[in-house]
Image: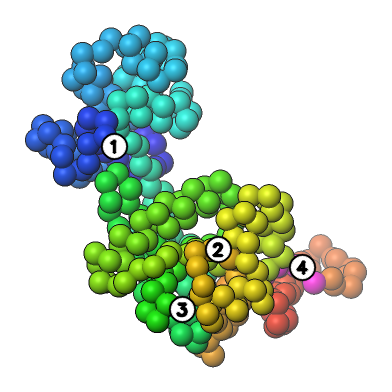
Amino acid sequence: MWPLLARIRDFGPRGASLGERPRANRRISAGLEARRMHPIRIGRIVRTLRRRRGWRQVDLATRAAVSQQTVSRAERGRIDELSLALLGRVLRALEAELELNVRWRGGELDRVIDEGHAHLVATTIDRLEDLGWMAIPEVTYLIGRDRGSIDVFASRPSHQAVLVVEVKADLTSAEGTLRRHDEKVRHGGQIARSRFGWDVAFVARLLVLPDASTPRRRLARHAALFDRAYPLRASALRAWLRDPGGPTGGVMFLSPTRRPSDRRDFTSRRRVRLARQPLLEHRLDQQAPVPRVRFIDSSIEHSTAE
């Protein structure tokens, strides 16, 4: 049994939207989305979709650019023997998609991961509103086969400007960030007109990162990519936000808003060190001393017994 939950979505014939799928495909997709995936069940799905197309295993292997043995392993549920990349190629050849979900202590995992992102989104909205923008958080969309969520969707009615903001608590993938942000910008005008009734003259993009050394270092590492998509920085970006004059892109580094109730900022690092103790003469009948632990925070330092 995989320690992950998975589901497979069948998009039907290539080029068809979700609303245009044949009735049989819609029934299969609904059933697959509703049930958790076991490796054996994944194998049965692969076999079913292959047979629906009248393919042999070797036909599917050719279209997925994998070996026939890989297809056989997948259909027999021997998923642990395959990499996610290979399994993804097999499913894409069948016009299906595998989605994985890691579960940990109910909903606590989402809360832990999203805490820093939520603080950064709130700070971004405050900054944009101070500069005269109307900002809306977490705007979802489903256009054709593209779907996702825009972290902050902003408008400047006086300039008929729309700003698609991507907020990243951690910049892990340069190519992935650029690709997903570009998709959102492409759909920005349609979303603004159809959902909010905004007049749109142009759509711009803004990438928001934490003001920390690691995001800055990763951005500099891929400067050739990011400088073309996000040419504005610092004072030039602030001037554009005050008076937007056309489609462009920029990068903004922000320190998340720190509320009085917060004990520490989410970006601070907390290390645990054992405090040094003077050497003691141990006797056979003497219990070993309890080690003292010193917690080091970005702004607070104290000691306590473990």
Q: Nearer the viewer, mark 1 or mark 3?
A: 3
Mark number displayed over residue 8: 1
Q: Where is residue 40 in the image (x, y as percent from the top left)?
A: 29, 27
> Separation of disc 2 and disc 4 at Cα?
47 Å
Reply above or below: 66 against 254.
above
Is residue 246 found left or right of 150 in the rendered image?
Answer: right
Q: Which of 108 and 239 is in front in this view?
A: 239
The magenta segment is 270-275
**Mark 3 highlights which residue?**
125
Q: What residue type is disc 4 on? A: Leu
Q: Residues within 10 Å of mark 3 (few under 14, many from 20)?
A: many
The three-letter code of the residue at mark 1 reads Ile
Spot occupied by residue 280 in the image (x, y as percentages of width and height): 88, 70
Q: Is mark 4 on a helix, strand or loop?
A: strand
Which label number is shown at residue 274?
A: 4
SS for callout 1:
strand
Mark-to-mark CA distance, 2 and 1: 35 Å
Amino acid found under the numbered disc labelled 2: Gly
Give me the C-alpha separation between circle 4 and circle 3: 41 Å
What residue does disc 2 label?
249
